[in-house]
């Protein structure tokens, strides 16, 4: 049986107020939030945008969703997790400050905005899934403890997965930083010696004493390293990073296995919105104003993360007249994530598209 995916089209250059009205119509017609029950805690998984980036879903649209959740007698909390890479979103304090700069505040949304501090053990949780690549997923506890999740994603390209939408926003986006490292690489972080000054910040921060300073350079003992990525966050010279090419062939499968961990025990308690607006080559983690690479499509809604991403993928490529994501990232096949997600029973590749006027 095909899953339902609802679409309301948006014209390029359409103003925010017009898109807000369209989003309200889409929510009315799709009933995508009907699963929300009174007195429940609803986690809204967002991406608050990296510094200098403008592709992220605007707070004006998030406010509409928050208002609908409150109208059902439930509590809405907008949340994201800290990043693996160095930037303004590596730690919770800076991440929240940047979110506020981008307009994601309690005053603007009428809802609480949080970024769980995963350096605090109580904010993370291990979820046993025993999948092919991931046996134990490392998640932000907030998303596991929430009664329901609304996943709001900007649909766009991605350097590691070809494209990113609802599935990526759940799989990578709900992972603690150690979980992000688990997905992105199969080895411990590496030290770029030309940048390392031997300052010792990483050595002092490492929770398992896996780092030593030798000949005024940091050395990571891979057999001791637990992959927590703390060293990446504290290095003031960006001298420690993930070997991004490692594990590139399996990153999509790992990401989808993380999606299965997030969706566990959330059957019938998930809703998805994809904003296929200002579609860019790279994700919103890019610290610059990435230009459009495809025409604006609109907003999609579904209770099936596989169907909504497949529909978004098909609509963008149809508008471009070619597989734009493969063209932009020729070494990546983004359909792998879709096929593996269906294989794991997370959703359906077959969908029926319903246009809302």
Image (tube, rainbow, N blue to C red):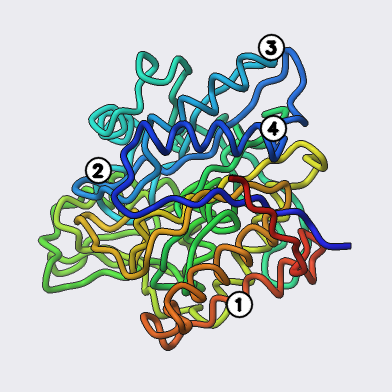
Q: Is there a contact, CB below 8 Å, between mark 3 and mark 2?
A: no
User: Marks 3 and 2, how far apart in space?
Assistant: 34 Å
Other-residue count near label 4 (Cα within 10 Å), few / some / many at <14 / 14–19 / ≥20: many
Image quadrant occupied by the C terminus? top right
State which tag comes first along the sequence, 2 or 1. 2
Note whether 62 is above or below 41 in the view shown. Answer: below
Element at label 3? loop
The image quarter containing residue 315 is: bottom right
Residue 33: % across, % down: 69, 32
State which tag comes first along the sequence, 3 or 2. 3
Residue 182: % across, % down: 53, 62
**Residue on which the image places disc 2:** 88
State which tag comes first along the sequence, 4 or 3. 4
Element at label 4? loop
**Residue on which the image places disc 3:** 73
State which tag comes first along the sequence, 4 or 1. 4
User: Marks 4 and 1, how far apart in space?
Assistant: 27 Å
**Residue on which the image places disc 4:** 33
Residue 156: % across, % down: 42, 62
Other-residue count near label 3 (Cα within 10 Å), few / some / many at <14 / 14–19 / ≥20: some
Note whether 105 is above or below 194 in the view shown. Answer: above
Residue lying furthest right:
1
Q: Is there a contact, CB below 8 Å, between mark 4 and mark 3?
A: no
For the point 64% across and 57% down, the residue is 308
């Amino acid at each position: 049986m095909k899953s339902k995916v609802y679409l309301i089209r948006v014209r390029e250059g359409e103003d925010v107020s017009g898109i807000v009205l369209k989003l309200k119509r889409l929510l009315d017609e799709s009933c995508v939030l009907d699963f929300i029950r009174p007195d429940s805690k609803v986690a809204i998984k967002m991406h608050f945008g990296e510094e200098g980036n403008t592709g992220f879903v605007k707070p004006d649209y998030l406010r509409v969703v928050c208002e609908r959740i409150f109208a059902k007698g439930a509590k809405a909390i907008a949340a994201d997790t800290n990043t693996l890479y160095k930037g303004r979103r590596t730690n919770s304090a800076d991440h929240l400050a940047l979110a506020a700069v981008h307009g994601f505040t309690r005053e603007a949304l009428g809802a609480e905005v949080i970024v769980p501090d995963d350096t605090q053990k109580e904010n993370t949780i291990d979820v046993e899934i025993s999948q092919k690549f991931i046996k134990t997923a490392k998640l932000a506890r907030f998303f596991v403890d929430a009664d329901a999740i609304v996943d709001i994603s900007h649909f766009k390209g991605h350097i590691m997965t070809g494209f990113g939408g609802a599935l990526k926003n759940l799989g990578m986006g709900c992972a603690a930083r150690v979980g992000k490292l688990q997905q992105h690489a199969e080895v411990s972080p590496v030290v770029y010696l030309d940048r390392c000054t031997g300052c010792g910040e990483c050595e002092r921060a490492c929770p398992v004493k896996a780092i030593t300073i030798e000949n005024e350079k940091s050395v990571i003992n891979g057999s001791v390293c637990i992959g927590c990525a703390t060293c990446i966050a504290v290095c003031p010279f960006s001298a420690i990073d993930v070997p991004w090419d490692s594990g590139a062939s399996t990153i999509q499968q790992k990401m989808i296995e993380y999606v299965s961990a997030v969706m566990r025990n959330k059957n019938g308690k998930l809703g998805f919105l994809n904003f296929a607006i200002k579609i860019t080559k790279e994700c919103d983690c890019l610290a610059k104003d990435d230009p459009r690479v495809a025409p604006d499509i609109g907003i999609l809604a579904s209770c099936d993360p596989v169907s909504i991403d497949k529909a978004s993928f098909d609509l963008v490529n149809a508008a471009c007249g070619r597989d734009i994501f493969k063209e932009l990232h020729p070494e990546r096949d983004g359909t792998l994530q879709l096929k593996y997600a269906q294989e794991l029973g997370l959703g359906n590749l077959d969908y029926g598209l319903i246009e809302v006027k």
